[in-house]
Amino acid sequence: MAELTITTFLSLDGVMQAPGDPQEDTSGDFPYGGWVFPLADEDLGKIMAGIFSRADAFLLGRTTYDIFAAYWPKVTDPSHPIAGKLNAQPKFVASRTRTTFEWRPATHIPDVAARIPELKKHFVREIQVHGSGGLAQTLMEHRLIDEYRLLTFPVVLGRGKRLFATGAVPATLRLVSSATTRAGVVYSIYRPLGALRTGSFIRD
């Protein structure tokens, strides 16, 4: 049975909006798109190639699907570590507004919470989520994520969409591993450990 993993680029203050291009997602008048580019180096490329090498399928929100569909089909080398996977492998798209998608193979998923447990049974390694902020909120709410892969960039944005936004379900995570690129990007892997645990340093 496959695991559902999520890979996300984050700023130090937790923003995940528009990492790749100034026009990627300007909703909310977000002015800082493309904040990943100056810190993208060979180390980051190797990390991302390793992540994509483990994918059997992809689960994407509609906005991320559209962003990817505008770029990755133009990279036609089947041996490319990212394009080769994205172009050839199944893509499942969570959307409330569209049911058909031109960048194939793609399948519409109207109810993620209901479909994911069954979908996992059809694959062996990983169903990967990349970006997809709105989808991520739903997956976290229903505790469907098996592993978080967070790449934290040494920038502060001060505004924008956040992965762990207000209203996120409280939880405890276990750090599996951590590494740092030469550009200062911290790559951390976490797995859910259960409900949030609290305590006190105050003694009677």
Image (spheres, rainbow, N blue to C red):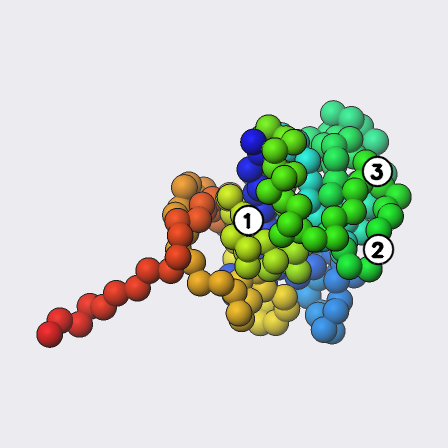
The residue pinned by badge 1 equals 144
Q: Is residue 202 above or below residue 175?
A: below
Residue 27 x %, y %: 74, 69
Identify residue type, mark 2.
Answer: Arg
Q: Residue at x 33, y 60 (%)?
A: 197
| Label 1: which secondary element | loop
Identify residue type, mark 1.
Answer: Leu
Does 18 sit left or right of 159 as displayed? Answer: right
| Label 2: which secondary element | loop
Label 2 to label 1: alpha-carbon separation = 23 Å
Of 155 and 146, the residue lying toward us: 146
Label 1 to label 3: alpha-carbon separation = 25 Å
| Local crowd size for mark 3, using a 10 Å CA cut-off: few (<14), some (14–19), many (≥20) | some
Q: Residue 104 got which mark?
A: 3
**Quadrant of res 104:** top right
Q: Is residue 9 above or below residue 84?
A: below
Disc nearer the start of the sequence (2/1): 2
Q: Quadrant of the N terminus?
A: top right
| Local crowd size for mark 1, using a 10 Å CA cut-off: few (<14), some (14–19), many (≥20) | some
The residue pinned by badge 2 equals 98
Residue 52 x %, y %: 63, 35
Identify residue type, mark 3.
Answer: Arg
Question: Are the two marked residues, 2 and 1, in contact with CB atoms closer than 8 angstroms?
Answer: no
Q: Residue at x 58, y 34 (%)?
A: 2
Of 161 and 184, the residue lying toward us: 161
Q: Quadrant of the C terminus?
A: bottom left
Disc nearer the start of the sequence (1/3): 3
Mark 2, mark 3: which one is toward the viewer?
Answer: 2
Q: Is residue 65 above or below residue 2?
A: below
